[in-house]
Image: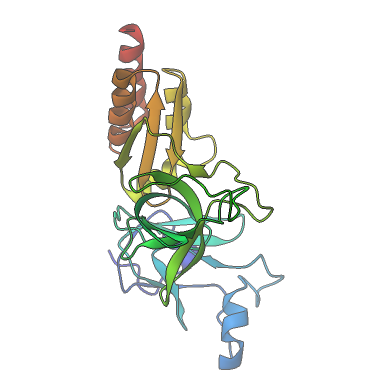
Amino acid sequence: MSARGEAAESVVGRVVLPGDVLLLPALPARPEEDEERLLRLGAAAGPPRGRLLCGPGLRRCAAGLLVTKAGVLRHRAAGGAYWVDSQQRRYVPVKGDHVIGIVTAKAGDVFKLDVGGSEQASLSYLAFEGATKRNRPNVQVGDLIYGQFLVANKDMEPEMVCIDSSGRSSGMGLIGQDGFLFKVSLGLIRKLLAPKCDIIQDLSQLYPFELVLGMNGRIWVKAKTVQQTLILVNILEASEYMTAEQRKQALAKLSGNR
């Protein structure tokens, strides 16, 4: 059933399709007020309740929000964010996203990284903590790098950095050579990155491990042994289609076999 023309708040949790238009409270009366009034929810009914953040799968239009991807509409009251939770596998770079890239080439002072998007991202050798012209990072083709996008838009090549605003690495940089890298859907990544994710908490009771999650759908995991690493990989991949009860039963069985 199409959600075209329905209020966005009433459609949260339901499936939406590309082309659906979701209405927002208090649409503007005059064209010159469009942008300002669309950014504020409930402006006509009372005090503004916060700014509207338009997330993946949605685009602003004169009537409200235009759906561009099929999936389930989600909403976070804190911050007023709307987005479409879909099973999309092709990643589109977004400024500020933390991703896992694979070094494909070194061109002068810039590394080229495959981030799973439509084009490669660039990374300067100076974009590492403590890097200088004399103290260059030891990065080779094939290495894995965890960083964030400093520039990401449709008109420019994506640019990554491995430092935050204060020049610290904050966990970003080269990822260890050992471990296992695999790819999952972007929907599962968002679920794993949620605060206090049940899946991660359950896995932490099974084995000690290292885990790096990239918003581009890539996961790097390393446990004490290769066998334990592969078990964690299989559970993470299957968790997208398992209920919480099924996952707990599988983990309980593995715990009993240790």
Residue at the location (33% across, 38% down)? 181
Residue at the location (55% across, 73% down)? 25
Residue at the location (42% across, 31% down)? 199
- In front of the other: 203 or 153: 153
The x and y percentages for residue 105 are 34, 56
Which image quarter is the C terminus in? top left
Residue 53 lies in what quarter of the image? bottom right
Residue 156 lies in what quarter of the image? bottom left
- In front of the other: 255 or 166: 166
Tag count in the figure? 0
- In front of the other: 180 or 191: 180
Outermost residue to the front: 134
Is 44 on the left or on the right of 219, as rendered?
Answer: right
The x and y percentages for residue 211 are 44, 33
Q: Is residue 21 above or below residue 185?
A: below
Residue at the location (31% across, 48% down)? 185
Q: Is residue 257 above or below residue 249?
A: above
